[in-house]
Image (cartoon, rainbow, N blue to C red):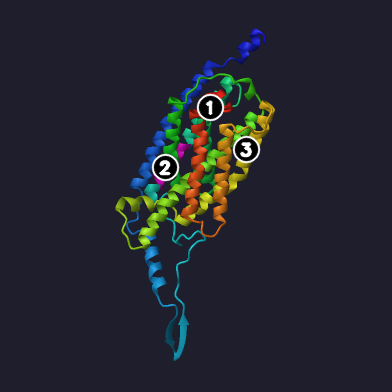
Amino acid sequence: MNLATTLAAEPNEDLAHISNVLIYSAMAVYLLAFFAHMAEWLFGSRSKVARTAAALTAGTAEAAAPAVTARAKGGTATLERPKVVTRSVTGARDVPDGPGAAAGDEKGDLYGRIAVSLTVLAFLLEFGGVLTRALSVRRAPWGNMYEFSITFSTVAVGVYLVLLALKKNIAWLGLPLVTTILLDLGLAVTVLYTSSDQLVPALHSYWLWIHVSTAIFCGAVFYVGFVATMLYLFRDSYETKLQNGGQPGRFATSVMERLPAAASLDKFSYRLNAAIFPLWTFTIIAGAIWAGDAWGRYWGWDPKEVWSFITWVAYAGYLHARATAGWKGRKAAYLALIAFGCWLFNYYGVNIFVTGKHSYAGV
């Protein structure tokens, strides 16, 4: 390799610096979006008379009514069957979404629009940071854990914004999303930061674009499904307490009435996980093909390979449980949390704590 080629392969430090500035700028705007989301949740409509409580109270009264009521009408007895509260296939109650699930009243909606606008701005800044990082090294911007993290958070926010454009009533996702994105970026720029550099020869392959990009996209969708699953468990407990005659605290009511019904959250998370699972299957297959090209074997029980497969099994078990009688609702949700925990360990734990063939990229 001549000197000109060597210099051409060196990272562009100016672009790398611009990338860092854009990432920090995105974090600052995400922080403003976090405060705007907090204002939306705190100062928007809190629904003093909760629709969920009203629906469950009415449902309990109707369910307790006689099965058939006789009423005289013009000398002729007619039979009336009372209305009953139906349940979804997951066993959740048939109750409406909280009044704040789609941003709430006019005041809450104003804060919500500000929060979304700031999130879009932060997304554009972060995307610019990922792009300039790629240009600084002239390769895919996910060659180490720092680059993987900033790309992952960018894609996660992108998934949220696309869903928000397609499905208007997911404003509830904004606050937990921005919170965890800030944590992810904070970890990236402190613990995981790596200076711009070229990759080892084994990573110079078109499979880097295919395999790792699909892994990032799958992780972003799995993450959104994880958030929905967590919120489903909280909302389901809230509805159960109301149905049993309990009185949740004012703060709990204010938060829970910002969420869709438990059945809606459960369905949303299931659809996301089911839709992305085939692509995760392809990700593992693509990794095996790349391993065959790079290392001369398709499978070698490397820690990253093992945990990718464990994650696949966990999500397969969750999807199977959803189709099996007796394993719906909360039981299936716990399986979904375990599955995402496997993905998270594969993302962080394997790279940081375990040594294997995937360790050459560093953290």
Query: Mark 3 Cα within 10 Å, few/some/many (few <14, many 20+)?
Result: some
Counting residues from the start of the chain, the first of labels 3 and 1 encountered is 3
Please determine whether, in this image, residue 182 is positioned above or below residue 233: above
Which quadrant of the figure has residue 30?
A: top left
Q: Amino acid at mark 1?
A: Thr
Q: Residue at x 39, y 59 (%)?
A: 240
Q: Label 1's element? A: loop
Characterize the magenta stretch by its predominant secondary structure.
helix
> Would you place residue 162 above or below residue 22 in this image?
below
Residue at the location (47% across, 49% down)? 334
Q: Which of labels 2 and 1 is toward the front?
A: 1
In the rendered image, which quarter contains the N terminus? Answer: top right
Q: Amino acid at mark 2?
A: Leu
Magenta region: which residues?
Answer: 109-119
**Residue 175, numbered label:** 2
Name the residue carrying label 3.
284
- Is 110 magenta? The answer is yes
User: In the image, which is nearer the foreground, mark 2 or mark 3?
Assistant: 3
Which residue corresponds to mark 1? 355
* Category of crowding for the residue at label 1, using alpha-carbon neighbours closer than 10 angstroms: few (below 14), some (14–19), many (at least 20): some
